[in-house]
């Protein structure tokens, strides 16, 4: 295998069940950014919220799906140029609005500053206190870099767990991240003290999104929406949420209509 593909992990899931496949009989390519738990991660032991959801949607809509795991920076470019490409766990932002087909709205994702010693309610406040960690290649990385001044430091990471470790070790004073992801990784590390969260600085909704070149995208979106509603009714979505977020948090999300 070519060196440039060494990070590509392809997991073939044949879910056709005798029914229709993707456009023109081709399987859907499901692009998963590595290190995106609890939402998705193609190389982890568990598939994540979006990973398990997409497996179920592929099954219920009788699609043949190939899951492709790669570093996040490659996901958007490769999926965007793929006529069979779908991206898991993509925040719907102004910058991305025209670049993808937004197929299924799955979860709200508020962005907060996670810290240990004190609460930060603004990026300016956190940068004045010390280095701030953020996921590279994201709109929030661009946002925080625009406002930093002088010798203020932004530490860009390629894996959210790196940011959690930086915060735990005291090498950054805050971590700019989705609240559910920060909580999940902190719990996985069994780290102390508990995280402190500032007020939400921004928020979006995480979607399953398709390439603009995706053939039959609107029809597939309708199928996925119907299958997702069925999962809510039969409580399979509730079981997935609870297995990653705990019963209390999953109930809170469901009570808000998710």
Image (cartoon, rainbow, N blue to C red):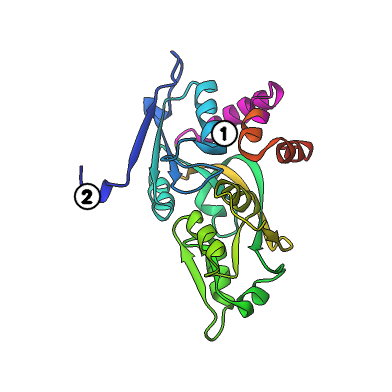
When the figure is inspected, residue 254 is found, relative to residue 71, above or below; the finding is above
Q: Secondary structure at mark 2?
A: helix
Residue at the spot of label 2: 3
Choose between 97 and 203: the one closer to the eye. Answer: 203
Residue 242 placement: quadrant: top right
Residue at (43, 42) in percent of width and height: 31
Q: Nearer the viewer, mark 1 or mark 2?
A: 2
Residue at the spot of label 1: 221
When the figure is inspected, residue 85 is found, relative to residue 61, above or below; the finding is below
In magenta stretch: residue 223: yes
Residue 30 placement: quadrant: top left
In the image, 96: left or right of 258?
Answer: left
In magenta stretch: residue 56: no
Q: Residues within 10 Å of mark 2 (few under 14, many from 20)?
A: few
Residue sticking out furthest to the right: 255
Percent position of residue 124, x then y: 65, 76
Choose between 131 and 27: the one closer to the eye. Answer: 131
Q: Which mark is residue 58?
A: none
Determine the main secondary structure of the stretch shown in magenta. helix
Q: Which residues are magenta?
A: 215-238
In the image, 209: left or right of 201?
Answer: left
Percent position of residue 173, x then y: 60, 70
Q: Residues within 10 Å of mark 1 (few under 14, many from 20)?
A: some
Q: Secondary structure at mark 1?
A: helix
Percent position of residue 54, x then y: 52, 32
Q: Earlier in the sequence, mark 1 or mark 2?
A: 2
Quadrant for the C terminus, please: top right
Residue sticking out furthest to the bottom: 150
Residue at (71, 35) in percent of width and height: 247
Q: How far apart, in angstroms, are the residues tagged by discs 1 and 2? A: 35 Å
When the figure is inspected, residue 248 is found, relative to residue 35, above or below; the finding is above
Choose between 29 and 247: the one closer to the eye. Answer: 247
């Amino acid at each position: 295998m070519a060196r440039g593909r060494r990070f590509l992990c392809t997991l073939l899931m044949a879910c056709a069940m005798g029914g229709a496949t993707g456009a023109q009989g081709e399987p859907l390519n499901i692009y998963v950014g590595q290190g995106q738990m609890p939402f998705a991660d193609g190389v982890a032991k568990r598939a994540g919220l979006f990973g398990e959801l997409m497996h179920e949607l592929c099954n219920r809509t009788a699609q043949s799906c190939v899951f492709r795991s790669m570093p996040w920076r490659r996901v958007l470019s490769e999926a965007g140029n793929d006529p069979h490409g779908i991206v898991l766990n993509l925040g719907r932002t102004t910058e991305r609005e025209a670049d993808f087909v937004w197929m299924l709205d799955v979860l709200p994702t508020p962005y907060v500053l996670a810290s240990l010693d004190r609460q930060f309610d603004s990026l300016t406040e956190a940068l004045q206190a010390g280095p701030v960690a953020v996921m590279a290649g994201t709109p929030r990385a661009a946002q925080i870099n625009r406002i930093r001044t002088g010798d203020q430091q932004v530490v860009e990471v390629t894996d959210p767990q790196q940011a959690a470790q930086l915060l735990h070790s005291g090498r950054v004073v805050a971590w700019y991240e989705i609240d559910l992801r920060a909580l999940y990784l902190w719990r996985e590390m069994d780290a102390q003290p508990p995280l402190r969260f500032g007020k939400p600085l921004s928020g979006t909704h995480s979607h399953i999104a398709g390439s603009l070149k995706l053939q039959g995208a609107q029809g597939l979106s309708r199928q996925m929406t119907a299958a997702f509603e069925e999962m809510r009714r039969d409580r399979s979505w509730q079981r997935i949420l609870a297995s990653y977020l705990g019963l209390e948090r999953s109930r809170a999300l469901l009570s808000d209509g998710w």
